[in-house]
Image (cartoon, rainbow, N blue to C red):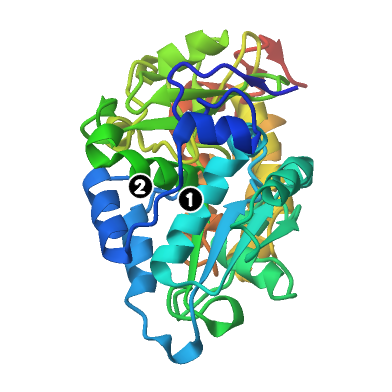
Amino acid sequence: MINTQPSVPRLLAAPSPSLHDHSRTFGPRPSPSAAELIGELERAALDGRGGAGFPAHRKLHAVAAQPRKRGAPIVIGNGSEGEPLSAKDAVLLASAPHLVIDGLLICADALGAAEGRLVVGPSTAGVVRAALAERSDAHAIRLHAESGGFVGGEASAVVAGLAGRRPVPADRPVRLAVSGLHRRPTLVQNVETLAHIALIARYGAAWHRSVGTTDAPGTRLVSVSWGDTSPRVFEVSGGSPLRSLLDAAGAPDTFPALVGGFHGAWVPASALDSPLSASGLAPHGASPGAGILHPLTEGECGIQVTARTLATLAAASAGQCGPCANGLPRIAELMRELLAGTDTTAELRRIAGLIDGRGACHHPDGTVRMLRSALVVFADDIAAHAHGRCLTRSEVRA
């Protein structure tokens, strides 16, 4: 079960997902021009909430700048959420579908888009379909329920799936903003990003920046989980200390934590007072990503968790390039050998160096980033495992 306990209700301010409560809470949907919307988003410093953190106004500007030779643009809301440790998009779509729809329509109107697509997971398709049926202005939005897996949520993979192809990331020489779905200029925004756009279009950049910090303005949704618990989703001010988020969720706060999800980075317990912001996490090689926090628990071995995560990432590969098809399974195998008591650290570092920057998409790079952070944060554990001993479980392996 997903628990939602918003502490700063903006995105989650409406008491129900109905259009009636949405309209009472937020008022009518505005219709800014492309220039007005791009300017307001730039002043708001809204970054994308899908994981990469790309500035929202730059994506919008890239599509707006395209000539109409190939037809009107297409706007896609991406709520596929393939990251196993994230539940924020599902919670947002279940709680505030109309805010997401508003954001999609605001972008579509500003760009003069011919159509909109909303891609969601199967668990939220029903509530979103009902929300679309409540509206008289959403006839141009088509809903797609997809479960494309971990790499299927990447923007080019989403576009490929909508085009009837295998939903895997593309090594694209041409950006989606230039030639995306049906070869038209295509804007793909995460659904949380769209919800923020809907609020900024209503209330302005200054309102957005009135909470959070200078380099992490506004609010964001975070997913906190530990052990085998389901993610708990909170709306928090940007730049909130990691430890405060863990404490609010009732999660352990004295052990290392994985920040940003499977493509994120491990940070030591000493870093948990860092703010959830790009600048606050950069010294630890991490970033907010999709707003994911996953700390270890008492008695849980970081090497074992990392080995399990690497196995999942290797299995999630699209198999389109050598780094994914060969490199990721080899890394997962080497980590299993380390877990069993063989010192494979030198080979892990060597293979990671061969993979980095050579993949057809960002999946191998994200996997290597997580691995390298584990080699640093769990250095003592790795040394012990290399000699057949697990520090966490205090056991000697035969």
The kind of residue tagged 2 is Ala
Check contact, mark 1 vs mark 2: CB within 8 A.
yes
Q: Which residue is rendered at x = 48% and y = 75% of the image?
A: 73
In the figure, is residue 346 to the left or right of 212? right
User: Would residue 92 be seen by someone viewing this image from the given angle?
Assistant: no
What residue would you read off at disc 1? 103
In the figure, is residue 246 to the left or right of 331? left
Estimate the x, y position of residue 92 in percent, counting from the top left.
Answer: 59, 35
Estimate the x, y position of residue 23 in percent, counting from the top left.
Answer: 53, 36
What residue would you read off at disc 2? 201
Q: Which residue is rendered at x = 49% and y = 8% of the image?
A: 247
Q: Which residue is rendered at x = 58% and y = 42% of the image?
A: 98
**Rendered-image quadrant of the N terminus:** top right
Foreground of the two, 204 or 223: 204
Q: Which residue is rendered at x = 66% and y = 72% of the image?
A: 160
The quadrant in which residue 8 appears is top left
